[in-house]
Image: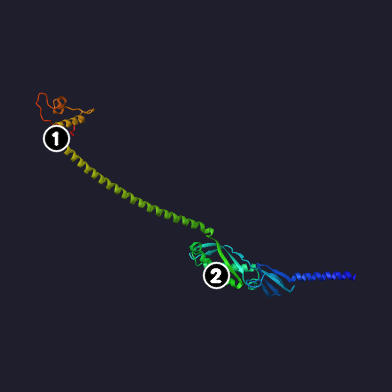
């Protein structure tokens, strides 16, 4: 009986020792940092950046407790908020932040836990967004000055977050857009501006086209006038050359010239048409029909005459 009691007591004592040993041992991981609290008072800070090392640690069981914090970068997702810019434009801004706990003691004293810290950091970030973006225009926020604005906001949040023992390592705007109620009006205004620009471009094009057409018409008129002048000059020179050649030919052989001119007159006046000639067969016009020399019957040879100079209706060439 006494042996059974002794064994039971020894088992209880061994279990109590095991529980005490288990309660007095804890580990701090590579990506963790810890606070050892003794009745609510901080006794030690373990694995803080630049101090201590991760590993196995001991504490007084049931008197000391351990609070673990993450050393890795933590996420902070911010709700979408509507901001008014310097040029009186409403914008919906969606942003996020990434932060790291640098001082776990200050973090514990200021925020106590990550959830509370996220609430405080979200308040700091939203306030900084409103203050900085309210001094900027829509174009600067969306296009030209976005990077510099985000750096300014991050510096502002870090000044406030320093009291929490954390550091903002990244702060970005994921989306900047117009509120739905403003989108239609903005699109209509953009459409009107594009139509106005298109009308201006068409008007300028029509003006340039009219100028080019007028210049082309003027150039055509000038070219035609110069061409007519040149053609008249050439025609006059040609007629002068023709008359000179005819005069020289007449002077060299008057009989042949008279014969040739008569043949041209016959060709022009005796075409197969409805032309009627009322003329005597003995007329000088027909003198080459009865005599190749152009002599009238019973007359002596005479100098040839140009039948084209007679009163015939056939044109002389």
As drawn, 206 above or below 49: above
Residue matched to label 2: 155
Q: CA distance from mark 2 to mark 1?
A: 115 Å
Task: Indicate which label's residue lies in the foreground, 2 or 1.
Answer: 1
Q: Is 4 or 268 nearer to us in this picture?
A: 4
Colour pattern of the rendering: rainbow
> Seen from this angle, which residue lies furthest top?
298
Which residue shows up at 25% across the image and 46% down it? 226
| Label 2 packing within 10 angstroms: few (<14), some (14-19), many (20+) | some
- Residue 133 visible (yes or no): no
Residue, disc 1: 252
Q: Is residue 303 above or below residue 130?
A: above
State left or right for residue 199 relative to residue 157.
left
Task: Determine whether, in the image, residue 146 is placed left or right of residue 307.
Answer: right
149 with respect to 12 (left or right):
left
Q: Residue 289: name its quadrant.
A: top left
| Residue 188 in sight here | yes
Q: Position of residue 113 (x, y in %)?
A: 65, 69
Position of residue 266 relative to residue 132, above or below, is above
Viewer-side residue, 264 vs 310: 264
| Res 125 → quadrant | bottom right
Instruction: Assign a secondary structure to mark 2.
Output: helix
Element class at badge 1: helix
The x, y position of residue 98, in whole percent, is 59, 65
On the image, which quarter does residue 316 sit in?
top left
Residue that sits furthest to the right in the current view? 1
Q: Quadrant of the C terminus?
A: top left
């Amino acid at each position: 009986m006494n042996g059974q009691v002794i064994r039971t007591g020894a088992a209880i004592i061994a279990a109590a020792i095991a529980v005490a040993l288990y309660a007095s041992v804890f580990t701090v991981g590579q990506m963790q940092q810890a606070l050892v609290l003794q009745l609510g008072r901080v006794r030690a800070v373990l694995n803080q950046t630049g101090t201590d090392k991760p590993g196995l640690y001991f504490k007084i069981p049931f008197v000391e407790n351990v609070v673990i914090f993450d050393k890795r970068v933590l996420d902070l997702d911010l709700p979408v908020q509507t901001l008014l810019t310097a040029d009186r434009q409403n914008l919906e801004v969606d942003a996020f932040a990434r932060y790291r706990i640098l001082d776990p003691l200050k973090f514990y004293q200021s925020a106590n836990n990550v959830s509370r810290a996220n609430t405080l950091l979200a308040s700091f970030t939203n306030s900084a967004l409103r203050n900085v973006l309210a001094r900027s225009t829509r174009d600067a926020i969306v296009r030209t000055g976005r990077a510099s604005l985000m750096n300014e906001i991050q510096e502002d949040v870090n000044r406030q977050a320093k009291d929490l023992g954390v550091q903002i390592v990244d702060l970005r705007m994921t989306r900047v857009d117009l509120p739905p109620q403003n989108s239609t009006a903005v699109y209509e205004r953009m459409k009107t501006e594009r139509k106005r620009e298109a009308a201006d471009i068409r008007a300028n094009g029509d003006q340039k086209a009219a100028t080019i057409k007028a210049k082309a018409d003027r150039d055509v008129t000038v070219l035609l006038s110069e061409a007519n002048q040149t053609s008249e000059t050439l025609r006059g020179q040609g007629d002068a050359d023709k008359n000179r050649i005819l005069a020289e030919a007449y002077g060299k052989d008057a009989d042949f010239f008279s014969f040739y001119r008569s043949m041209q007159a016959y060709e022009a006046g005796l075409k197969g048409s409805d032309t009627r000639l009322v003329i005597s067969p003995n007329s000088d016009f027909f003198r080459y029909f009865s005599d190749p020399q152009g002599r009238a019957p019973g007359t002596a040879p005479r100098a040839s005459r140009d039948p084209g100079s007679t009163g015939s209706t056939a044109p002389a060439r």
